[in-house]
Image (cartoon, rainbow, N blue to C red):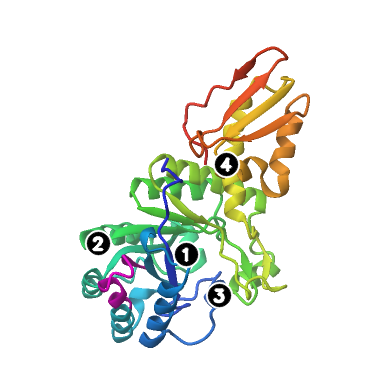
């Protein structure tokens, strides 16, 4: 599993919601997901956003800053528009303010000439909106491509020298745990550089909303989505593929009452998943210690919230598991993040828990 203590790149997002995409998938309302509903960016706006970001007191030149075009099909933009936006962003790479550029796009929108232009203008990572590698799920969702086109896209992008990421959506129409985990296994086989997991939610005004009201679609519950994403995250990261985000990013528009009709939405979804993975690690360490008079959990200070869980729910569950209810969390900077140690007392001497064989916690 990758070392999550490693500093992540600082990413400045530029949103192009639904621009360049020839389809409108059944779940899609990109304008609300990105929180941006106005017209397409132009070069002057790109320059303004990046200038302000670079001048911000929060800007960290040592954090490998990147520029990211999100929210639409970047390679599907009119070529003149694509060149204008990319040239404006690339000026900030050439002058040393940013290290590189990443874009998101569809697997079936990869013109070789456009890819060559991107590669020569600072783009190093392309995130593909894969969503699923199950043919029936893709058809139900009206994605407009087949699983084999995703595999061809990965090969084409690697041929042009790009790192390739995948965005996946568990819980699409026709999906279930078995089907989605087959997608996860295939993504691991294809050696994607990174993955995002976005459980499907029902947004007002979408085709999926009509299907939900008619009883044609039932979304995953929050618990079901957290469990599946935890399993998927553990599998991918054990194979060296970092999961860099889980759950939709909140926005003022998205969080208005009535915008999300159903589905596993939670403003801290990723934290719920990471907490679940950490609790699985602790459950293994606690085996045999539940009857101890007291349990002390030594963790890196950064991991304390993962032991406590959302609103201290995980800590309360740990206290229920220990006979006496005595659970002490000890921040310990000598511990490696993700590697807790459990010490139990039987009234005489402390006994240190044995770590589980699979390695670090989520």
206 and 46: which is toward the camera: 46
Q: Residues within 10 Å of mark 2 (few under 14, many from 20)?
A: some
CA gap, disc 1 and disc 2 = 23 Å
Relative image position of residue 289 (x, y in whole percent): 67, 21
> Eyeballing the image, is 179 above or below 54?
above
Which of the two labelled residues, at mark 2 and mark 3, occupies the earlier sequence position? 3
Residue picked out by circle 2: 156
Q: From the viewer's perspective, is the residue at label 4 or at label 2 nearer? A: 4
Q: Which residue is mark 4?
A: 301
Residue carrying label 1: 139
Q: Is residue 147 visible?
A: no
Q: Are marks 2 and 3 in contact (CB under 8 Å)?
A: no
Give the CA distance from mark 1 to mark 3. Answer: 18 Å
Looking at this view, name the residue that lies furthest to the top. Answer: 348
For the point 48% across and 26% down, the residue is 357
Q: How far separated are the C-alphas under marks 4 and 1?
A: 46 Å
SS of the residue under disc 4: helix
Front-most of 3 and 59? Answer: 59
**Sequence order check: which comes first, mark 1 or mark 3?**
3
The segment highlighted magenta reads 89-104
Q: Residue at point 72% right, 45% down? A: 312
Classify 10 Å Cα crowding around label 4: few (below 14), some (14-19), many (20 and above): some
Separation (CA) of disc 2 from disc 3? 29 Å
Helix, strand or loop status at disc 1:
helix
Residue drawn at x 74%, y 38% as measured from the top left:
316
The residue pinned by badge 3 equals 29
Mark earlier in primary sequence (4, 2): 2
């Amino acid at each position: 599993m990758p070392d999550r203590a490693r500093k992540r790149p600082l990413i400045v997002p530029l949103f192009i919601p639904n621009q360049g995409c020839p389809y409108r998938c059944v779940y899609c309302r990109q304008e609300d997901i990105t929180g941006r509903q106005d017209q397409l960016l132009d070069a002057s706006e790109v320059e303004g956003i990046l200038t302000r970001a670079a001048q911000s007191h929060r800007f960290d030149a040592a954090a490998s800053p990147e520029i990211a075009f999100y929210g639409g099909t970047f390679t599907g933009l009119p070529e003149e528009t694509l060149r204008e936006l990319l040239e404006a962003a690339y000026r900030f790479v050439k002058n040393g303010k940013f290290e590189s550029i990443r874009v998101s796009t569809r697997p079936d929108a990869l013109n070789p000439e456009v890819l060559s232009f991107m590669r020569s203008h600072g783009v190093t990572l392309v995130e593909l909106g894969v969503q699923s590698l199950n043919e029936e799920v893709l058809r139900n969702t009206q994605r407009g491509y087949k699983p084999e086109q995703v595999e061809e896209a990965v090969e084409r992008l690697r041929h042009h020298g790009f790192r390739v990421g995948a965005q996946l959506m568990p819980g699409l129409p026709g999906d279930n745990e078995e089907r989605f985990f087959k997608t996860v296994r295939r993504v691991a086989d294809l050696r994607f550089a990174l993955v995002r997991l976005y459980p499907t939610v029902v947004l007002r005004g979408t085709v999926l909303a009509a299907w939900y009201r008619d009883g044609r679609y039932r979304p995953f519950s929050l618990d079901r989505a957290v469990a599946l994403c935890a399993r998927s995250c553990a599998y991918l990261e054990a194979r060296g593929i970092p999961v860099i985000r889980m759950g939709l990013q909140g926005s003022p528009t998205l969080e208005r009452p009535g915008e999300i009709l159903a589905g596993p939405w939670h403003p801290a979804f990723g934290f719920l998943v990471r907490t679940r993975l950490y609790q699985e690690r602790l459950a293994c360490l606690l085996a045999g210690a539940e009857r101890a008079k007291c349990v002390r959990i030594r963790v890196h200070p950064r991991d304390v919230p993962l032991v406590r869980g959302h609103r201290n729910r995980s800590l309360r569950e740990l206290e229920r598991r220990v006979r006496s209810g005595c659970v002490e969390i000890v921040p310990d900077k000598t511990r490696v993040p993700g590697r807790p140690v459990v010490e139990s007392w039987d009234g005489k001497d402390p006994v240190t828990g044995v770590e589980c064989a699979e390695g670090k916690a989520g």
